[in-house]
Amino acid sequence: MILEPRGNMRRDGNMGIGEKLWHVSWSLVALIALVASVGFFMLYSAADGSMSPWANKQIVRFAFGVGLMIAVALVDVRFWMRQAYLIYGVALFLLVLVDLFGTIGMGAQRWINLGFVQIQPSEIMKIALVLALARYFHGASHEDVGRPLFLLPALGLVMLPAALVVVQPDLGTAILLILGSGATFFLAGVRLWKFGILIALGVGAIPIGWQFLREYQKNRVLTFLNPERDPLGAGYHITQSKIALGSGGLFGKGYMEGTQSQLNYLPEKHTDFIFTMFSEEFGMVGGLLLLVLYACLIAYGYAIALRSRSQFGRLVAMGITSIFFLYVFINIAMVMGLLPVVGVPLPLISYGGTAMLTLLFGFGLMIGVYVHRDVNMGRRGASDDV
Amino acid sequence: MSRQADRNKVFSRRATLLAGGKLLLFTALAGRMYYLQVIEREKFATLAEENRISLRLLAPPRGRILDRFGVPLAINQENYRMLLVPEQASDIEATLEAASEIIPLSDHEKTKILREAKRRRSFMPVTVRENLTWNDVARVELNAADLPGCMIDVGQSRFYPKADRFSHVLGYVSVVSEQDLTGDPLLELPGFRIGKAGVERVHDLALRGKGGNTQLEVNALGRVIRELARNEGQPGAEVRLTIDATLQDFAYQRLGEQSASCVVMDVHSGQVLVMASAPGYDPNAFAQGLNAEQWKDLIQHPRTPLLNKCIAGQYAPGSTFKMMVALAALEHNVVSPDFNVHCSGHVELGNSVFHCWKKEGHGYVDMLRGIMHSCDVYFYEISKRVGIDRIADMAKRFGLGNTLDIDLAGEKPGLVPNREWKQRNLRSAWSQGETLVAGIGQGYMLTTPLQLAAMTARIANGGIAVRPRLTYEVATGHESAPLPTPTYPSIQINKANLAIVRKGMRMVVNEPGGTALGSRLPNPDWIMCGKTGTAQVRRITMRERDTGVKKNDELPWKERDHALFVAYAPDDDPKYAIAVIVEHGGGGSAVAAPIARDVMMETLRRDPVSDGARDRFAYSAEKDRAG
């Protein structure tokens, strides 16, 4: 499934554009496009059989995103390695900025308005954190990773942005950052008992953290624990979502025939709850197929990571894959009532430009790791220092 | 190298573990799907098919707008409309064809209705026509058998009983546009209308009220089974204005066909009793929707019916500005009231000649006679001595050159120039000739009728910085709570100096030789004090002076002078101030002053701010019906 490198493999990584393009994993690009197309069809259905207002915009964004993805893939991974901390620093600075001056949208401060474009620093941070942690652990030996003191700065790299994101308040992204980084720590070889301590600390902190949650966040958690608490208020989303999904049955009601979604019982059917609509119309069979497609994408991530010769490349590929997995899992679990509603979109399918761009940028990095899989990388990202 | 191999081994092992974990979690998702979609399918399917609750928003009735005595100015009217339910009509096109026998429908309308019917679900009604007459309704009902799927529905639409006489004050309502959406779900209701101009816009939030909702039992196809609960929401608040509708009617009629405006206000409280701008437009047409031609007529009309001239018309104040010059001179002790100037009909400054309106001159003139005769040469002389900055400062203290923040959208600030303004905006130095021109209220100077009324009120009330206001109260429910009169600051002016100017204004209207003698009040108990103004809108060339200045009626309408008049009354205890401007009307004394006299006379007769007025004029629906 992945192209074999040609005979004249060049380990210094100074390939021409043509050669790099040859190495791009086009089958992965096609798979991504396939999943995104499922999204276009669902957005067409969500708009009552119309390209506007969602499907047409989403297609344009996706086309732009794919261009960006290929461009990112062609950039030498050593560049990302060298600039990892700088990118992280800029993302952190923007996060501070958004906390101080950000625009309030939907009750949370998440955007910086630059006049011509709005940026969401927490999205940049998802990528930046993957890069920074990969660089941090790239040069680390097994012994280094064993020392608790060595791990503290890396922990700081995670907690600082997570804290900044929580105050926005955007709990969903904070959880994504922490769990996604957890995977990197795990793969870098951090001992399991250390995770145990952190998890124990985290569980212990829940009663304290509870008091800092906003009213709507508390409601979401309480509603999750007991959805019938308020069937017309906060529990409405999840109850309606379960009715729609459950009534879809094994084979679904047919494309554009989902009564619950089409009659607007289902809220946010074009964004966070798009999986519900999909499952209502295509049933469990459709849902499982989609899950398999996602699993294939994740498998690609693993394959790329295992083929990469550098620890940096491996950790980047796995970091991106983990974030992608978390998106999929949290969203689907949420609409099926397994997790509280935290506002995480279904990757590549939900309507929305920012998450789409972040993901495609991430996939760009992943493909870049594949293109440059045989490049030698020293501790600082230079090819000569082994 | 072994170190790296070690690390790689750890990585591979852990990646496998992680993959296992992910697989496990995905399996959990699949299991949940199986649980919801296979095991529990029956339950959810029943829930989905069975009746269930649907929440629908109810639009609250929009609050009424009343005049100070309760006369309704904006109300809600029942609006009969014909709806078509596509699924009940076996053949929509045939039904539409039959319907157009009763209500003529253009082809364009028909295609629009068909498109709308196609776009929506077949049980959702489509509007065929709004604002049906009672006659149409009866004929539709009578022919119901031939019109399968058609039904008559009653909605509410805004109606303005006084139509064009209040169009500028009240504004109008119109459909919500994209940029009006604020997240209030009411705004997304089809057919919802919000205030787009005037009082309708300023008090839109209060008038709008709070949306109610109804819980409906709806079956899987969305058809309503029955209503479970209903929350009516809160109807919009009633807004009562300070305007006296009868007086406003009188003033508007008195302005007639001219392009003119009239403001009457209480000199103490600032309550505006009349704000008439002519010609008006019919706001009811806006509520029903204008066609392109009607709209073109409105915006291309030379007498600008869409403009509220009272607050957005900006005019040179002409001689009505002379009070400001006189007060600036007196307050700064530049001249005494007895100071004499000889008017020979013109004055020379450098190479320029500045003319008095009276070609043969006024002879010797002091301040009182200067105001009374409106002698330009006298004011050229004193403004030269006072200087533009002190004149401008005085004008600003009297409310000119800045918005007065009246509770109405679209107020214009006017312009009172000074040295700094010219340097900043025109990048050139102020010249003395410009001071002379400003001294007779011409040149860069711009004021609105509202500002002139406020200026006159401030002269009349002894130098209190009163501001005009339009809202008497905003009443939610049945309690009446008039807004309190704000305490206005004093503008710190010597009462003796004010008395001189007021005496001059009294002479204008009441002494032989005064420029508005013909407009004194017919009732000798009431004395009106005022000042005429004639604002030139074109330049008179030297050649024209030689051959004789053209009379106004010889000129095309657009080049004729604006006629202005400001006044207050009664002289002994001032209560009301008035400003009248007739665009291109000719002279202030001949055109504007008689209008002001009649409106002021009517105002004093009605005395709408007096304690007894409320009892005498209180509106009752029965009386209205009887009359």
Image: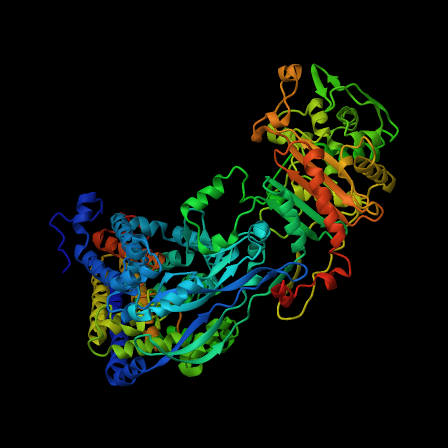
Q: Horizontal placement of A212 versus A326: left or right? A: right
Q: Indicate the position of residue B522 as horizontal and vertical percent values.
A: 78, 44
- Tell me where residue A128 sits by quadrant: bottom left
Closer to the camera, B232 or B596? B596
Determine the image quadrant of residue A133.
bottom left
Residue B255, image x, y percentages: 63, 43
Please tell me which residue is depicted at 21% across the width and 44% down the height of the picture: A17
Residue B420 percent coordinates (x, y): 67, 31
Left or right: B573, with A74 as reference point: right
Does residue B528 sit above or below B39 in this rendering?
A: above
Quarter containing the N terminus of chain B: bottom left
Image x and y of residue B164, in percent: 56, 50
**Foreground pick, A362 / A250:** A250
Q: Residue furthest left?
A: A7
Picture quadrant where residue A308 is located: bottom left
Residue at 71 percent of width and 53 percent of height:
B271
Can see residue B45? Answer: yes
Q: Quarter of the image for the C terminus of chain B: give it.
A: bottom right
Residue drawn at x 25%, y 63% is: B94
- B66 sits to left or right of B377: left
Q: Is residue B29 above or below residue B523?
A: below
